């Protein structure tokens, strides 16, 4: 297992288009997080999963954002009708979930640019 | 919204000097406090996970302390080197959710 992987690494899209990102966590990790990071800010929480269950979604997230983790393994994050303000780095992280204090392992992120 | 705040936002350090910076977090519903180092073009990597009030952890020239009662943690870098240049993130784990501060960006000048 080579760690958390995200695909694609970069995405340029026109405003109004839909985009989907994928995250493959470390196998056996039960907990998966999605964050958004913009310039000068730390990672902003978007949502997280315990296995296939989505336990929380940020109130900052509009209805255009949806995430799934159908089999408790990989996860997808979809943004519908993209806007320029969606341009950011989207980070995925996973933790074992057995011990809540476990460190998070991050993917390298998907950088989205909406033009 | 959980307030995890880091100070300062950025700092410049001369090579060989020591430095420190802070992370403040809610003192209620505390499970753990994480520190991560985030280098340009890489993923954030964990430095420390601390759970107990009074915890002190050390990795090489970097160390951290934790005060859960007053809700703050310090990260120390002793004898800064150019390879220490990075953004240092702290994250509060409470109610099963990991919430991050905005980070402190450290630039070490040779």
Image: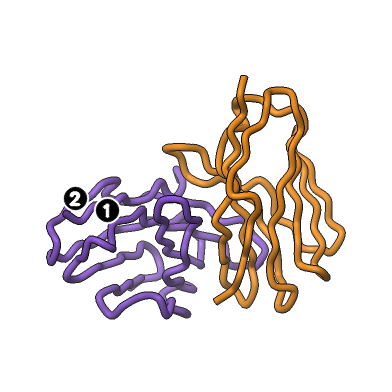
Chain colours: A purple, B orange
Give residue A14's quadrant in the image. bottom left
Q: Is residue A98 left or right of residue B44?
A: right
How many numbered discs? 2
CA neighbours of label 2 inside 10 A, class few (<14), some (14 to 19), many (20+): few
Name the chain letter of the residue that bears numbered label 1: A
Label 2 marks which chain's residue?
A
Q: Secondary structure at mark 1?
A: strand
C-alpha span from label 2 to label 1: 6 Å
Label 1 CA crowd tier, 10 Å (few <14, some 14–19, many 20+): many
A61 in relation to A13, above or below: below
Residue for point 23% across, 61% down: A84
A83 vs B11: above or below? below
Residue A112: numbered disc: 1
Q: Residue at position x 87%, y 59% from top?
A: B54
Which quadrant: the N terminus of chain B? Answer: bottom right
In this orientation, which residue lies closer to the viewer: B55 or A42?
Answer: A42
The residue closer to the viewer here, A10 or A24, is A10
Q: Is there CB contact under 8 Å for labels 2 and 1?
A: yes
Image quadrant for the C terminus of chain B? Answer: top right
Q: Quadrant of residue B15?
A: top right
Residue assigned mark 2: A12
Name the element at disc 2: strand
Q: Which comes sooner in the sequence, label 2 or label 1?
A: 2
């Amino acid at each position: 297992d080579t760690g958390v992987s995200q695909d694609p690494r970069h995405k340029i899209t026109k405003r109004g288009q839909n985009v989907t990102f994928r995250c493959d966590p470390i196998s056996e990790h039960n907990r998966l997080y999605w964050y958004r990071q913009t310039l000068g800010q730390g990672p902003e929480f978007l949502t997280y999963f315990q296995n296939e269950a989505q336990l929380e979604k940020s109130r900052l997230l509009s209805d255009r954002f949806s995430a799934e983790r159908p089999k408790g393994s990989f996860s997808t994050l979809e943004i519908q009708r993209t806007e320029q303000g969606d341009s950011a780095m989207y980070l995925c992280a996973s933790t074992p979930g057995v011990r809540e204090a476990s460190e998070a392992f991050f993917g390298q992120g998907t950088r989205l640019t909406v033009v | 919204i959980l307030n995890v705040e880091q100070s300062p936002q950025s700092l410049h350090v001369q090579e060989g000097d020591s430095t420190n910076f802070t992370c403040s977090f809610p003192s209620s519903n505390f499970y753990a406090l994480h520190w991560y180092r985030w280098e340009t073009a890489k993923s954030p990597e964990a430095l420390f996970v601390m759970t107990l009030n009074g915890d002190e952890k050390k990795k090489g020239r970097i160390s951290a302390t934790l005060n859960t009662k007053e809700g703050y943690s310090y990260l120390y870098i002793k004898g800064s080197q150019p390879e220490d240049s990075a953004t240092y993130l702290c994250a509060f784990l409470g109610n099963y959710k990991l919430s991050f501060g905005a980070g402190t960006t450290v630039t070490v000048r040779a």
